[in-house]
Amino acid sequence: LGDLSDCDAVIEAVFEGMDLKQAVFEQLGAVCRADALLCTNTSYLDVDVIAAASGRPERVVGTHFFSPAHIMPLLEVVRGAQSSPE
């Protein structure tokens, strides 16, 4: 994950398990720049719970890619309760 330390935005796409996503976001919160946008690719898990694990919920949003992506190039962005409007 250290290679992500200088990214402007990171999109997580691990298995839909809350424990796993929280563990990933805890690590992302530790290695990514303070101003990086952290995105979770979830279709049903609570973005706020995932965001809290990062330690910077204001920089976290949910993303949902519609399938199949090559036919339906649409991305839904879901703000969490603490997501910054920026």
Image (spheres, helix red, strand yellow):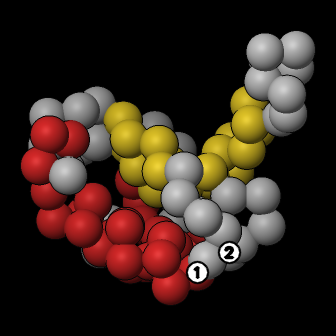
**Image vertical order of residue 15 relative to residue 41, above or below:** below
User: Which residue: 28% across, 31% down?
Assistant: 8
> Mark 1 sits on what residue?
18
- Give the left or right position of residue 75, taking residue 1 as reference: right
User: Which residue: 70% across, 51% down?
Assistant: 78
User: Which residue: 77% across, 58% down?
Assistant: 43
**Image vertical order of residue 35 relative to residue 15, above or below:** above
Q: Residue extending furthest bottom?
A: 19
> Mark 2 sits on what residue?
46
How many labels, in total?
2
Q: SS for tag 2?
A: loop
Q: Quadrant of residue 75?
A: top right
The amino acid type of the residue labelled 2 equals: Asp
Residue 69's x, y, as percent? 78, 24
In the image, 55 versus 71, the foreground residue is 71
Callout 2 crowding tier (Cα within 10 Å): few <14, some 14–19, many ≥20: few
Residue 34's x, y, as percent? 18, 51
Mark 1 and mark 2 lie on one chain; the one further toward the N terminus is 1
The amino acid type of the residue labelled 1 equals: Met
Callout 1 crowding tier (Cα within 10 Å): few <14, some 14–19, many ≥20: some
User: Which residue: 38% across, 41% down?
Assistant: 10
Q: Which mark is residue 86?
A: none
- Give the left or right position of residue 39, taking residue 23 as reference: right
Tag 1 near tag 2, CB within 8 Å: yes
Residue 1's x, y, as percent? 20, 52
Q: CA separation, marks 1 and 2?
A: 8 Å
Nearest to viewer (mark 1 / mark 2):
1
